Amino acid sequence: MRHTRLVSLAASLGLLGAVPAVVARAQSPVASPHGRLTTACAQCHTASAWKPARISSQFKHPNTFALEGAHARTTCASCHRSLEFKKVVTTCVGCHTDVHRGELGGDCSRCHTPRSFIDRAAMVRGHQASRFPLTGVHAAADCISCHAPTAQGQMQFVNRPTQCESCHLAEAVIVKDPDHQAAGFTRQCEQCHSPTVWSRARFDHANTAFPLTGAHSRATCQGCHADRVYAGKPTDCVSCHRTEYSATTSPSHTAASFPTTCGTCHTTSAWTGARFDHDGPYFPIYSGAHRGRWTSCSTCHTNQASFATFTCLTCHAQTETDGHHRGTSGYRYDSQACYTCHRNGRAP
């Protein structure tokens, strides 16, 4: 268009002889700012306006660096800061600052993908090949929570400590229920905690002097360790169950001076439903004719202060026993007399 205006101006001024020189100068070759680029100009420029360049859909980026993911969405100038396109570097660090400071080598594709530079899936997979594979909530943690920025020259990613306390010591210090410091707990957190949920700790009591069975295995730590004492706790039942021992009235343990070796009658399955070995050394009440004929110890032992005292007469009326013992020498309607002849709950 500019050339046409020059020709018109020259004609009006009678200078047509100069036109070929002007046209010749306008048509002289110009060095391409893109260097040795063989792509046709029309794929980016138009005759109506040289700028701005508009990339045609026909343009194909060289296969030496295929545009994938986020690379396909970025602007040309983001990578081609010089108009000589072939001079651009194709390594990741050519465009991306290496926040790892070379600690992890130059192959960024081990952890990153073109889809997103912060694609966590690839990072986690890369971490699995390290000496600290990520499991549980560790796999969802932000990298910077473990790899905190450090001063230049200090390692941030390589040779990091893998002990739990290196990241979780602060949690262990502030926890008071139970108080880890006061109890002198080990710093091997994995003995109680898992990487799934930090707060859902589970201590293996089986390795202690008091393995947990029955209802004990369902009790909370505070149920036994409300005093926050963990080492050297007494293991005898009455140390925890003194209140139940004293409150029991059927039979009254205190009045009868029962021993505090609770395991003689009770089990860890349930405190109620105690079962005393009455059948073997004394009298069969769990088997034989008297099975199911009584409801509590006080059915036969009416004197709560002495279980050596018992009565058969609560259930066995005199009219019944007299009828069964007609003609029996030495018979008398008395509990001790009954036990003398019927030690096994059966007729002699």
Image (cartoon, rainbow, N blue to C red):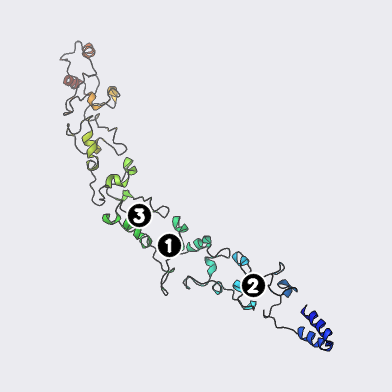
Q: Is residue 69 above or below residue 14?
A: above
Q: Are marks 1 and 3 in contact (CB under 8 Å)?
A: no
Q: Amino acid at mark 1?
A: Ser
Q: Give percent across and percent down for residue 329.
A: 16, 13
Q: Nearer the viewer, residue 105 or 137?
A: 137
Q: Amino acid at mark 2?
A: Thr
Q: Quadrant of the N terminus?
A: bottom right
Q: Which marked residue is nearer to the observer: mark 1 or mark 2?
A: 1
Disc 2 from disc 3: Cα separation: 52 Å
Q: Quadrant of residue 22?
A: bottom right
* Residue denoted by label 3: 191
Q: Amino acid at mark 3?
A: Gln
Q: Is residue 67 above or below residue 287?
A: below
> Would you call the spot at circle 3 few (<14 residues within 10 Å), some (14-19), or many (20 or more)?
few
Left or right, 173 with respect to 20, comes to left
Q: As drawn, which residue projects farthest toward the front?
A: 13
Disc 1 from disc 3: Cα separation: 23 Å
Q: Count numbered badges in the picture.
A: 3
> Would you call the spot at circle 1 few (<14 residues within 10 Å), some (14-19), or many (20 or more)?
few
Q: Give percent across and percent down for residue 42.
A: 74, 73
* Residue denoted by label 2: 64
